[in-house]
Amino acid sequence: MDDEAVIPILRVQDAAAAVAWYERLGFRQQWEHRFEPGLPAFVEIARGGVRLFLSEHTGDARPDTLVYLRLHDVQDLAAAFGVPVTDAPWAREIELADPDGNRLRIGTPTP
């Protein structure tokens, strides 16, 4: 293993619907695991080096989690989602909520 990483786990009700929503942010599904057909899904999505796990398993994560994503294109994402950009001393930021209520604060660092 070359790189160490932190990968947040977000609780979702419907992994396929969550993956479709995250695709709007530029994420792509990497893999999906189920212990057996019909059991809850555990999915990895990625956008470049940024990775998230989406889990249908009860108890893996709490709803209403807040994750901070540092991405390069906050202005484009704000336009795509129709939300305003906030200027903080450290970054230009937006805040979104996925279909399951997980909150994403997305920032592009300011020089």
Image: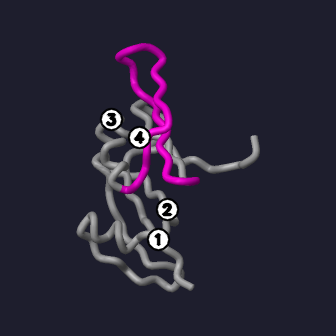
Task: Determine whether 33 is above or below 69 in the image.
Answer: above
Disc on the earlier residue, 1 or 3: 3
The x, y position of residue 43, in whole percent, is 46, 35
Q: CA distance from mark 2 to mark 3?
A: 21 Å
Residue position for label 2:
69
Residue 72 relative to residue 18: left or right? right
Residue 28 colored magenta?
yes
Of tags 4 and 2, which is closer to the observer?
2
Residue position for label 1:
107
Task: Determine whether 67 is above or below 30 in the image.
Answer: below
Of tags 4 and 3, which is closer to the observer?
3
Does dot 4 land on a helix, a strand or a loop?
strand
Residue drawn at (72%, 48%) of the image: 3
Q: CA distance from mark 2 to mark 1?
A: 6 Å
Residue position for label 4:
11
Disc on the earlier residue, 4 or 1: 4
